[in-house]
Amino acid sequence: MTIVKSNLCPTCGGLLNIDIDKQMYVCSFCGVSFDYEYFREDNVKEVASKAVLRNEYGSAKDAYDFMLAKDPHDFEALRGLFLCKTRWTDMKQMFNDSEVDVSPDEPSLLNAIDKCLPEHKAYFEKVREALEELYHYRGLTAKAKSIEKKKTTAEKELSKLKSEYDYNARGFSDLCEEVWNADANTFRFIVTFTVIVPLGLLIYALLEKQWWLLVVMGILAVTIIGGYYLDKFFTAKTLTSRMIPFEKEIAELAEQYKAKDAEAEES
């Protein structure tokens, strides 16, 4: 019967040397020896499974290759080679999706589907189906995150426009309050040109009976006040028209995100 030519010591995990003369395996680390019978077919499965649990995938692969050399359809060996390739200790690790980094087209899995017996094919095909669903799920969540990012960007732009709109909508009293709270130099400048100078001109026009100056000042006052409110009106219209596309985009993105999130949850 064919024997395994290499393995790790089941006792300490050290490399085993082959003593041809004594027909034994000898561990160079702990000194334990095993005859060839230990590694015959009856023990290979146990040796391989223990090696997988110890994360000794190279040793496990040697054992599984030995098993497949005798029986190319061996279920445990085909599954074991897949575990060695994915570096999993058991198939339950598939359910920890954040740590799964194996493609549905992994060659060892495709080989298992191709080489296994008919009664085992459904098992490996289900594994591949689960991996395909996982990649589908990841695609959906990535798309949902992308939509959420776009939505957040649109919300920030809309928030800026709303702030501008609120600023533009402030009343005259708010403007006076802002002037009052301005620094000293700014306050003096504004008061000089909006209160003291016009008041001085008004007193001069009344004392000297310069009626034309009163008319000019009246026209100027009406123009300034009218221009101020017209500017507020058109600014409000412009900001409103600029906000509408963002509001529509946010609503559409919210629906898209909801749909993708629901689809991902179902997946």
Image: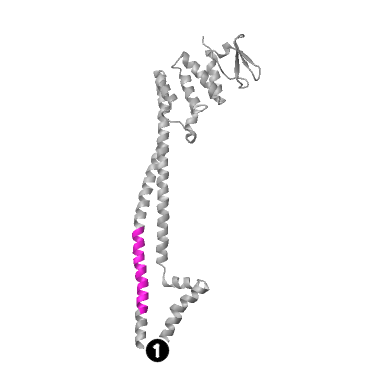
Residue 146 x, y percent position in the rendering:
41, 45
Q: Quadrant of residue 223?
A: bottom left
- The image quarter containing residue 117 is top left
Residue 34 drawn at (x, y percent): 61, 13
The residue at which mark 1 appears reads as 206
**In this image, 22 relative to 241: left or right?**
right
Amino acid carrying mark 1 in the image: Leu
Residue occupying the point 36% across, 85% down:
213
Residue at x 52% of width, y 74% of height: 184
Q: Quick one: 208 or 11, which is closer to the camera? A: 208
Where are the magenta residues, as a range? 220-242
> SS at mark 1?
helix
Q: Main secondary structure of the magenta part?
A: helix
- Answer with the quarter of the image where residue 111 lies: top left
Q: Position of residue 75 (x, y in %)?
A: 45, 19
Q: Position of residue 42 (x, y in %)?
A: 53, 13
Q: Eyeballing the image, is 61 above or below 198? A: above
